[in-house]
Image (cartoon, rainbow, N blue to C red):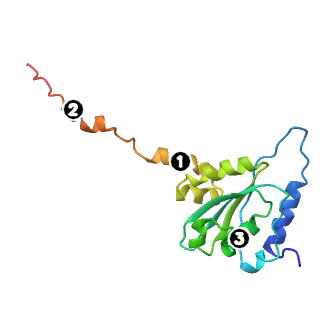
Amino acid sequence: MSGPTGRFAALSDRLRAQRSLSLSKGERPAARRIVHRYLSKASVRWRPRHTEGMPWMYIVKCADGTYYAGSTAFSDVVARVREHNHLDEKAAKYTRKQRPVRLVYAEEFERVDEAYHREKQVQGWSRRKKEALMAERGEDLPALSRSRQRPARRTLRQAQRPAPRPAIPEPVEG
């Protein structure tokens, strides 16, 4: 078994460097964002699934162009994507029907519950907002919120009310 080559060598070096950063006592690191693009099948074969390490929230692009957000408690997110592609018993029901999937974005967290919360948050986002996250355009995220784009819904009572009549101007004497 050999180690990573090319793009993944730089990625693993960057991950090792981030993990080796010393923090002052009580300080927690922010989520680390790693963007993966264009993974080939050969690049994921050598990677075993490790149980130690940090949990991840990830986004994969499915064969039909849709995005699937998931999280894993294991340290190797690339191995988890391989499971989505090759192992029916470990793949999500949605990704089993949309193979092959390709990892396009991942965030590493300190705790599993943080990764799970982020997964649920991202699952509720629109496609455009997920794409802005993947492109690391954080300043665009608030503007892409669904609540800001959707007009206010009218309640049934408001819909049943007749529209107000325009005021008729009073004649001016003069």
**Residue type, numbered disc 1:** Ala
Say which residue label 3 marks.
83
Say which residue label 1 marks.
143
Around disc 1, counting alpha carbons within 10 Å, would you say few (fewer than 14), some (14 to 19), or many (20 or more)? few
Q: Residue furthest top?
A: 173
Residue in the foreground of this view, choosing between 134 and 79: 79
Determine whether 42 is above or below 73 in the image: below
69 displayed left or right of 158: right
Q: Secondary structure at mark 3?
A: helix
**Foreground: disc 3 or disc 1:** 3
Determine whether 145 is above or below 101 in the image: above
Alpha-carbon span between mark 1 and mark 2: 33 Å
Residue 43 drawn at (x, y percent): 77, 77
Q: Are marks 1 and 2 in contact (CB under 8 Å)?
A: no
Residue 147 drawn at (x, y percent): 48, 44
Alpha-carbon span between mark 2 and mark 3: 60 Å
Q: Quadrant of residue 82?
A: bottom right
Label of residue 18 in the image: none
Q: Residue at x 84, y 74 (%)?
A: 4
Q: Quadrant of residue 72?
A: bottom right
Q: Secondary structure at mark 2?
A: loop
Look at the image and tell me in which quarter the N terminus lies: bottom right
Q: Residue at x 75, y 68 (%)?
A: 78
Label of residue 164 in the image: 2
